[in-house]
């Protein structure tokens, strides 16, 4: 019974990754990422297009937050 629980607590082996030079030649970058509260890190690979789109989304969100169009002020609040 002890041997059974010892096997169940081990992490599954990761799949082998292609050589980093091969990935870099195609514009793919990989890094380890761990979700909040997790003890297991996963390898995440992104292409240049995915990274560019994420940066664009972040900039659009920043622009929207800084646009200042929140609507009219309530009558009991002084707004600038």
Image (cartoon, helix red, strand yellow):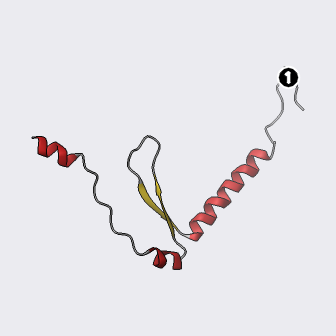
Apparent side of residue 77 relative to residue 61 in the rendered image (left or right): right
Residue 8 horizontal/vertical position (percent): 20, 47
Classify mark 1: helix, strand or loop.
loop
Residue 71 horizontal/vertical position (percent): 81, 36
Give the position of the C terminus as an image quadrant. Answer: top right
Apparent side of residue 33 relative to residue 10 in the rendered image (left or right): right
**Nearer to us in this view, 61 or 40:** 40
- Residue plotted at (46% across, 47% down): 35
**Nearer to us in this view, 65 or 45:** 45
- Residue plotted at (84% across, 20% down): 76
Q: Residue furthest left?
A: 1
Q: Which image quarter: residue 72? A: top right
Residue 31 horizontal/vertical position (percent): 48, 61
Q: Which residue is mark 1?
A: 75
How crowded pointer 1 is (Cα within 10 Å; few <14, some 14-19, many 20+) is rated as few
Give the position of the N terminus as an image quadrant. Answer: top left
Q: Which image quarter: residue 27? A: bottom right
- Residue plotted at (54% across, 69% down): 47
Q: Residue furthest right?
A: 80
Relative to residue 22, is residue 12 depicted above or below? above
Relative to residue 76, is residue 44 depicted above or below? below
Apparent side of residue 19 relative to residue 5 in the rendered image (left or right): right
Apparent side of residue 20 relative to residue 16 in the rendered image (left or right): right
Residue 9 horizontal/vertical position (percent): 24, 45
- Residue plotted at (67% across, 60% down): 56
């Amino acid at each position: 019974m002890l041997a059974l629980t010892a096997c169940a607590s081990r992490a599954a082996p990761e799949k082998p990754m292609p050589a980093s030079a091969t990935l870099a030649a195609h514009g793919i970058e990989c890094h380890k990422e761990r979700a909040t509260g997790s003890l297991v890190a996963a390898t995440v690979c992104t292409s240049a297009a995915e990274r560019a789109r994420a940066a664009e989304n972040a900039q659009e969100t920043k622009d929207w937050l800084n646009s200042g169009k929140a609507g009219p002020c309530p009558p009991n609040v002084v707004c600038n």
